[in-house]
Image (cartoon, helix red, strand yellow):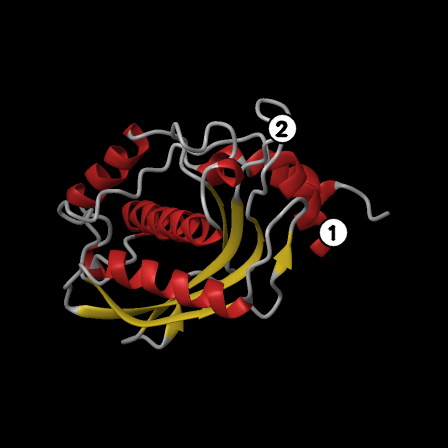
């Protein structure tokens, strides 16, 4: 599996994401009765991808925990839900040759949601999310040329929290995770439609590559 992750990273280095995580000063996207309980971030199986700077488990856990707190701490619903995040692998771009060998930074993580009142998981299997650095003038040639490691960590973690939020919004619209007994509301569906209009998530861009990596025979 670790080999598959590295293969996936190699295929993702040329991709850039449309994720915009610079919306923390705006009204939170509708998430029903969601209120963040425990925010548990771990990285026991952390794998560094090819052509990457080094970042420790402790560094990733610290920056990812903060990004999740910053985003989901804005919600004040009436029910507690716990987030469990396992950081699986990453690439922090190193300086390369402009326009030829300048890699992009990337992150892979698994997410599980717990309903505190029901004492059960909302997703039976962890949701795997692939995160890419935000496309901008500073990262067009690869963030390794323009950003410090700390900035790359912050960028990816903020984008990861945003993509987790987008996933929860979709699940709420489809399955009513945070809607109570009445199921998905019109407001939940409108929230999901709004994030789809913002553009394609990095996780969607990577879906085909992930499927191919999973189907590839072991070597």
Left or right, 208 with respect to 85, comes to: right
Q: Position of residue 31 (x, y in %)?
A: 22, 53
Quarter of the N terminus within the rendering = bottom right
Q: Nearer the viewer, residue 11 or 80?
A: 11
For the point 26% across and 34% down, the residue is 193
Dot 2: within a 10 Å radius of its alpha carbon, few (fewer than 14), some, or many (20 or more) residues? few
Per the rendering, the mark at residue 97 is 2
Left or right, 189 with respect to 146, comes to: left
| Residue identifier under label 1 | 3
Per the rendering, the mark at residue 33 is none
Decide if residue 1 is in sight here: no
Left or right, 100 with respect to 160, comes to: right
For the point 44% across and 60% down, the residue is 123
Dot 1: within a 10 Å radius of its alpha carbon, few (fewer than 14), some, or many (20 or more) residues? few
Q: Position of residue 218 (x, y in %)?
A: 82, 48
Image: 62 above or below 167: below
Of the two numbered discs 1 and 2 on the same chain, state the one appearing first in sequence: 1
Mark 1, mark 2: which one is toward the viewer? 2
Q: Position of residue 189 (x, y in %)?
A: 23, 40
């Amino acid at each position: 599996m670790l080999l598959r992750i590295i293969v996936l990273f190699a295929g993702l280095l040329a991709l850039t994401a449309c994720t915009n995580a610079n919306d923390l000063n705006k009204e939170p996207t509708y998430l029903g009765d969601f209120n963040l309980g425990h925010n548990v971030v771990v990285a026991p199986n952390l794998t560094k991808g090819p052509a990457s700077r080094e970042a420790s488990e402790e560094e990733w856990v610290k920056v990812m925990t903060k990004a999740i707190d910053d985003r989901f701490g804005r919600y004040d619903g009436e029910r507690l839900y716990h987030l469990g995040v396992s950081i699986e692998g990453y690439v922090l771009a190193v300086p390369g040759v402009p326009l030829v060998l300048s890699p992009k930074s990337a992150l892979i993580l698994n997410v599980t949601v717990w309903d505190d009142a029901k004492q059960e998981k909302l997703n039976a299997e962890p949701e795997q999310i692939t995160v890419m650095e935000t496309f901008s003038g500073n990262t067009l040639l690869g963030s390794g040329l323009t950003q410090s490691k700390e900035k790359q960590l912050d960028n990816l973690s903020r984008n990861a929290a945003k993509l987790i939020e987008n996933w929860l919004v979709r699940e709420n619209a489809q399955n009513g995770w945070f809607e109570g007994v009445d199921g998905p509301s019109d407001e939940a569906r409108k929230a999901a439609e709004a994030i789809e209009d913002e553009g394609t998530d990095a996780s969607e861009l990577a879906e085909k590559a992930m499927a191919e990596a999973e189907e590839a025979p072991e070597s």
